[in-house]
């Protein structure tokens, strides 16, 4: 039986898990409902983001189990504890989707970064994994930001 992980580590991983699962769900919601100029490129970009965050959520959940935790990504847990801002139902204009995903990806990366100092000494491996995931989220946020005229 794995040694019981410190609460700071399991809490950090669980928080990242629900945010990543939520990002994947919101990504599909936008992938389906998006409309407007450059539809196809953003539609496809969203699927790339979804693939990445799904892989990341699997890594986070399995790390959590490996250190003696119990990942919870039931729909109810995601709905109650994800800190990712939601999307409105219905059609979503391309320019709005770009801004929304830039913000949601960056905010999710920021929340992971904020959890890192408490995790670093307690579990360097979880820390290292989360650094990689936050770096990926920031990269995707930049890709959305780079496609807007104002940046
Ligand atoms: Fe699709």
Image (cartoon, rainbow, N blue to C red):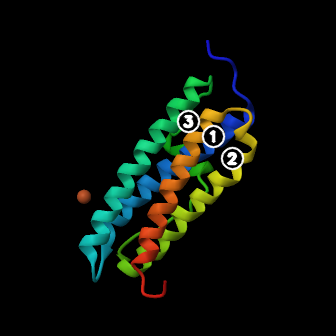
Residue 146 at x, y percent in the picture:
43, 76
Give the quadrant of residue 92.
bottom left
Residue 65 at x, y percent in the picture:
56, 26
Does the residue tagged 2 have its C-beta within 8 Å of any atom of ligand 1?
no
Mark earlier in primary sequence (1, 2):
2
* Residue 88 falls left or right of residue 124: left
Q: Which mark is residue 20?
A: none
Residue ID at (65%, 35%): 124
Q: Which mark is residue 127?
A: 1
Q: Is the residue under label 2 in contact with that under label 1 (CB below 8 Å)? A: yes
Q: Is residue 47 above or below residue 77?
A: below
Q: Secondary structure at mark 1?
A: helix
Residue 83 at x, y percent in the picture:
61, 56
Q: Which residue is mark 2?
A: 116
Q: Is residue 89 visible?
A: yes
Q: Is residue 68 above or below residue 52?
A: above
Judge by depth and name the residue closer to the eye, 1 or 130. 130
Ligand 1 shows up in which quadrant of the image? bottom left
Q: Is the residue under label 3 in contact with that under label 2 (CB below 8 Å)? A: no
Q: Which residue is mark 3?
A: 72
Q: Secondary structure at mark 2?
A: helix
Q: Residues within 10 Å of mark 1 (few under 14, many from 20)?
A: many
**Which of the two discs, 1 and 3, sits closer to the camera?**
1
Q: Secondary structure at mark 3?
A: loop
Residue 106 at x, y percent in the picture:
56, 64
Give the Cα separation between the discs numbered 1 and 2: 6 Å
């Amino acid at each position: 039986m794995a040694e019981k992980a410190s609460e700071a580590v399991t809490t950090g991983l669980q928080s990242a898990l629900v945010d990543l699962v939520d990002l994947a769900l919101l990504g599909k919601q936008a992938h389906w409902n998006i409309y407007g100029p450059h539809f196809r490129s953003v539609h496809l970009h969203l699927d790339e983001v979804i693939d990445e965050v799904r892989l990341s959520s699997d890594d986070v959940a399995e790390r959590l189990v490996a250190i003696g935790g119990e990942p919870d990504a039931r729909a109810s847990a995601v709905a109650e504890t994800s800190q990712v801002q939601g999307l409105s139902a219905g059609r979503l204009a391309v320019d709005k989707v770009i801004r929304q995903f830039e913000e949601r990806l960056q905010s999710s990366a920021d929340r992971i970064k904020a959890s890192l100092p408490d995790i670093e000494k307690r579990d360097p491996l979880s820390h290292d994994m989360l650094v990689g995931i936050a770096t990926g989220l920031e990269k995707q946020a930049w890709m959305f930001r780079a496609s807007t005229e104002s940046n």
